[in-house]
Image (cartoon, rainbow, N blue to C red):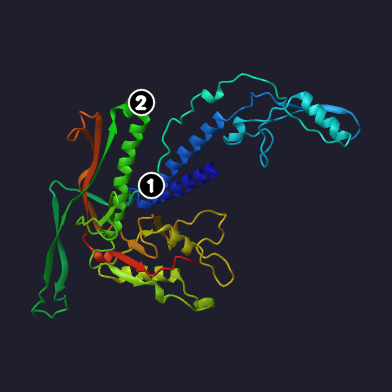
């Protein structure tokens, strides 16, 4: 399945690149970049699967010898693979399972007893004889898995947005917001109309997102893998907050300190709390029947048109949704019970809506969607990329504690709010 999908992606990518060369385009677009990322992920997954298959090959294990009765009354002997699994062809190597690590191991004598009993129509039970024995098994230590069981995190939204590196704590954009007057057709020698371009300034100050973690020197020396995991997890926690702020800004960002909870007023505005973005109420698109049946699909098509005719003349290329909301959309059916987003759910997974890439993340609010034209809305200004430093605080050194700090400074700069549209009142159930 993975190799088939990889071949399909390679084929589509080759077609897209051939089209790009035919029109003289040198750079790849976002769709082609997404295909390249998917190909790399598929390559990694295929490599891991092949590695697991190689590790799980237990063909060297002694096969079970089984006596098989034939219809003519004669007996023949054949080998039965102890690791065979239902649903797999004989000789195929299944993916590593616990069953491969604990294969069946009945002796030939036990199998002969069972066969003889079956031929006579009798019951047969194989039991282990109970005898006195010596063991120290309860005294043996447990085997520790070499790596911590990690938490799972969402993908980084920042990877899908344009960035702009700044060298000062703030950045100012001079924007042309309106025009007074308009051009006109004039006669020879007549006065030409005057146009006045009205401007304003948008200043955004970088916001610091940071966290720290302290580890004892003992755990660092006794289990280095835990230090590696803790450093990576520190990064991921920052990215989780980053995702929430980019989507919702200050609203709904809870910071916990023990049993105390408060709203973190960071000063960063996200897409949803930026003044001037377009909005569309999906609750008006309900009811109807047959060819006039209305659903969330109508809401998104109307939202796309609203962006296109808006002040930014935007064409969205990214939709950000909560997984529950996206699930409800994918399960929309027509009057005949057919899925509308993906008519054949077995053919592949739908990851686009009206030709627009869909990014699902739990950082997005349920029942809402954000449509973004990533080429027109603005930038994410980066003052300091996500970095890590190691040091001591107060009495950490005397207590053998090594402290790690992860931080970044950035701010979302929506220079054209009409290039962003919020669809709200979406159903979370079809």
Camera-side residue: 428 or 120?
120
Task: Give percent across and percent down for residue 350.
Answer: 48, 57
| Residue appearing at x 26%, y 64% in the figure | 273
Residue farthest to the top? 134
Outermost residue on the front side: it is 132
Q: In the rendered image, which residue does mark 2 sit on?
A: 222
Q: Nearer the viewer, mark 2 or mark 1?
A: 2
In the picture, measured across the screen, residue 345 lies left or right of residue 110, that is: left
**Can you identify the residue that label 1 sits on?**
153
Q: Residue 255: where, in percent of width, then height?
A: 27, 52
Q: In the picture shown, does residue 85 fall above or below 413?
A: above
The spot of residue 191 in percent (x, y) is 8, 79
Q: State the SS at label 1.
A: loop
Q: Is residue 90 above or below residue 24?
A: above
Query: How many C-alpha atoms fall within 10 Å of the one at disc 2: few (<14), some, or many (≥20)?
Result: few
Residue 246, given in percent of the width and then of the height, sits at 28, 55
**Residue sitting at x 74%, y 24%:** 107
Graded by Cα atoms within 10 Å as few (under 14), some (14 to 19) or many (20 or more), the crowding at tag 1 reads: few
Outermost residue toward the right in this view: 72
- Distance from the alpha carbon under mark 2 to that under mark 1: 27 Å
Q: Earlier in the sequence, mark 2 or mark 1?
A: 1
Q: Residue at x 23, y 30 (%)?
A: 399
Q: Secondary structure at mark 2?
A: helix
């Amino acid at each position: 399945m993975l190799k088939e999908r990889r071949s399909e992606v390679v084929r589509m990518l080759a077609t897209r690149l051939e089209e790009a060369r035919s029109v003289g385009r040198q750079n790849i677009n976002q769709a082609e970049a997404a295909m390249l990322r998917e190909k790399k992920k598929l390559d990694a997954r295929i490599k891991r699967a092949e590695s697991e298959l190689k590790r799980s090959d237990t063909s060297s294990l002694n096969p079970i010898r089984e006596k098989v009765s034939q219809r003519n009354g004669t007996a023949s002997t054949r080998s039965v693979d102890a690791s065979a699994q239902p649903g797999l062809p004989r000789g195929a190597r299944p993916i590593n399972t616990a069953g491969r690590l604990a294969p069946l191991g009945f002796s030939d004598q036990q199998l002969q007893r069972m066969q003889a009993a079956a031929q006579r129509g009798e019951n047969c039970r194989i039991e282990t004889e109970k005898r006195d024995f010596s063991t120290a098994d309860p005294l043996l230590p447990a085997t520790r898995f070499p790596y911590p069981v990690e938490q799972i995190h969402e993908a980084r939204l920042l990877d899908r947005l344009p960035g702009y590196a700044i060298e000062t704590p703030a950045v100012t954009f001079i924007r042309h917001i309106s025009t007074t007057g308009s051009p006109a057709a004039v006669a020879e020698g007549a006065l030409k109309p005057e146009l006045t371009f009205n401007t304003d300034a948008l200043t955004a100050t970088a916001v610091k997102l940071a966290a720290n973690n302290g580890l004892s020197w003992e755990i660092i020396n006794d289990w280095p893998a835990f230090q590696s995991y803790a450093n990576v997890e520190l990064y991921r926690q920052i990215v989780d907050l980053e995702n929430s702020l980019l989507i919702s800004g200050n609203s709904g960002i809870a910071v916990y300190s023990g049993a105390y909870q408060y709203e973190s007023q960071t000063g960063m505005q996200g897409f949803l709390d930026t003044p001037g973005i377009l909005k569309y109420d999906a609750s008006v698109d309900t009811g109807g029947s047959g060819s006039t049946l209305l659903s969330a699909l109508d809401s998104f098509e109307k939202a796309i048109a609203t962006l296109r005719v808006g002040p930014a003349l935007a064409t969205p290329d990214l939709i950000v949704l909560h997984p529950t909301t996206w699930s409800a959309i994918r399960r929309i059916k027509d009057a005949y019970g057919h899925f509308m987003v993906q008519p054949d759910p077995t053919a592949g997974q739908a990851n686009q809506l009206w030709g627009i890439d869909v990014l699902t993340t739990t950082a997005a609010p349920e029942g809402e969607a954000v449509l973004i034209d990533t080429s027109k809305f603005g930038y994410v200004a980066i003052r300091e990329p996500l970095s890590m430093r190691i040091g001591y605080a107060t009495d950490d050194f005397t207590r053998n504690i090594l402290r790690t700090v992860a931080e970044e400074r950035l701010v979302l700069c929506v220079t054209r709010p009409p290039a962003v549209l919020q669809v709200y009142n979406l159903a979370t159930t079809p």
